[in-house]
Image: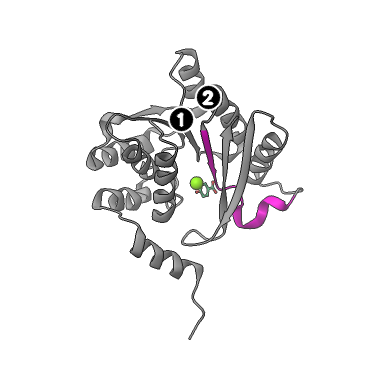
Amino acid sequence: QDAPTAAAVDRYLTDMLVNEDEALRLARESSAETTAPGIEITPAQGAFLALIAQIAGARRVLEFGTLAGYSTIWLARAVGPEGHVVTCELSEQNAAVARRNLERAGVSERVDILVGPALDSARSLAQEGTEPFDLVFVDADKPNNPGYLEQAVQLGRPGTVLIVDNVVRGGAIVDASSEDPNVIGVRALMDALHDDPRIDATALQTVGLKGWDGFSLARIR
Ligand code: DHB
Ligand code: MG
């Protein structure tokens, strides 16, 4: 018999522990209608994100990168009916898919989708003097990761939790000579975190349904 794979283990753990209702399943599957099919977080990662949000007692969440709104639904449910999620999405096509998914999941009233370049949307939030966010999930275009980190710090407060997706990329991030803009973006993020006295950070590698990747977990001091 073949050795179990990380994907098989992920399926087993997800079957045992993760309650994905029909709205979440349909949202996940609808990523096929977006500009980047199949890159959404896995069910187990969604549950992880929701647990972190709940452990942190997060009421206000900022997300960079909505896509079909799959992670948005996990976060919106985690913050509860009194909570609020602001999610930034470049593409109107993706935002339209996400709106439908948020509606079906029953969380559209606690979510704002800001359509346009996320750096601009976050700058507007800062100019409006928006309340600080308790948790920021960065999962958008990787070359802008350093900019999103800076905005997360500006829009956060001491204790704000930062999570950045896709920081391992099949191991590609150790290649200092990589010309992949995604790798360069993640490495620039690591450079920024490396000597930022405002932030405590770590990163963990992950395996499973999406293969070998990882996320960074950080906290504003
Ligand atoms: C990519 C982006 C993601 O957010 C993801 O989860 C996987 C891959 C990418 O840009 O390659
Ligand atoms: Mg991602």
Residue depicted at x 73% and y 33% = 195
The residue that mark 1 highlights is: 134
Residue depicted at x 48% and y 86% = 1
Type of amino acid at the residue the image marks with label 2: Arg
Residue 109 position within the rendered picture, expressed as x and y whole percent measured from the top left: 26, 29
Residue depicted at x 49% and y 23% = 122
Residue 66 position within the rendered picture, expressed as x and y whole percent measured from the top left: 41, 38
Q: Nearer the viewer, residue 210 or 78?
A: 78
Please identify the quarter of the rendering in which residue 73 is found: top left
Real-space CA distance between mark 1 and mark 2, rounded to the nearest whole angstrom: 7 Å
Type of amino acid at the residue the image marks with label 1: Asp
Residue 130 falls inside the magenta stretch: no
Q: For the residue labelled by badge 2, is the local secondary structure a helix, a strand or a loop? A: loop
Q: Quadrant of the C terminus?
A: top right
Q: Which region of the structure is painted magenta? A: 161-175
Callout 1: few (<14), some (14-19), or many (20+) C-alpha neighbours within 10 Å? many
Q: In this view, does 170 lie above or below 134?
A: below
Please say if the residues under marks 1 and 2 sit with CB atoms less than 8 Å apart.
yes
- The dot on residue 14 is none
Q: Looking at the image, which residue sits at the far right? A: 177
Q: For the residue labelled by badge 1, is the local secondary structure a helix, a strand or a loop? A: loop
Please identify the quarter of the rendering in which residue 102 is found: top left
Q: Is residue 17 above or below residue 84?
A: below
Q: Looking at the image, which residue sits at the far bottom? A: 1
The residue that mark 2 highlights is: 157
Residue 42 position within the rendered picture, expressed as x and y whole percent measured from the top left: 42, 54
